[in-house]
Image: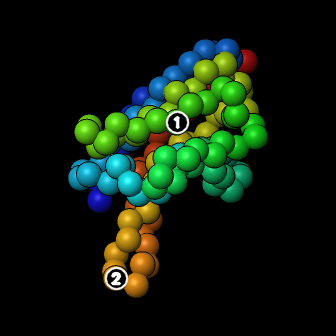
Amino acid sequence: VQLVESGGGLVQAGGSLRLSCAASKSVFSSNPMGWYRQAPGKERESVATMTGGGSINYADSVRGRFTMSRDGAKNTMYLQMNNLKPEDTAVYYCAVDEVVNVEGATMRSWGQGTQVTVSS
C-alpha cells in the first residue's frame, strides 16, 4: 500500500493543524495504524496508534491535544493537532500494518512524511 501524508506546515504556538494520510487501497478499516514523528537529532517516536478494533493510544506528550481518527470509506486517517507547542516540531509519518501471509506475519508501510513546524 502507498501512503501519502498532507496538511503539515508552519504554525504559531497555540495553533492547530490537521494531518491527513491517504492510502492507495482500503487498509484503514481493520488494520493497526498510527502516527509517528521524528524531530532533528532524535529517534522516531509514536504519537498516536490505533488497533484494528479502533482503540487509540496517545503519547503522554500529546494526550488531550491531539486526536486520531479514520474514515474507512475514504481510505484516509487523520491527526487533529490542537494547542501546538514548539516541541511538537518534527516530520510526521503515518503507518499501517498489514497481514501478508496465512501465518499472520505483518508488514508495515510508511508514508513519506510531512513537516510540522511550530514557532514560539
> What residue sits 30% from the left and 48% below the top?
23
| Percent x, y of residue 86 | 71, 27
According to the image, label 2 marks what residue? 102
Mark 1 surroundings within 10 Å by alpha-carbon count, few (fewer than 14), some (14 through 19), many (20 or more): many
Image quadrant holding the C terminus, namely top right
The residue lying at 68 percent from left, 56 percent from top is 43
Question: 54 and 91: which one is in front?
Answer: 54
In x, y percent, where is residue 51?
52, 54
Question: Of helix, strand and loop, which one carries label 2?
Answer: loop
Where disc 1 sits, the SS reads strand
Q: In this view, does 28 lie to the left or right of 92?
A: left
User: Which class describes the residues within 10 Å of circle 2: few (<14), some (14-19), or many (20+)?
Assistant: few
Q: Can residue 21 be seen in this view?
A: yes
Q: Distance between the residues labelled 2 and 1?
A: 30 Å
**Which of the marked residues, 2 or 1, is nearer the chain's N terminus?**
1
Residue marked by disc 1? 68
Residue 105 % position (x, y): 43, 79
Q: Nearer the viewer, residue 92 or 54?
A: 54
> Which quadrant, please, contains the N terminus?
bottom left
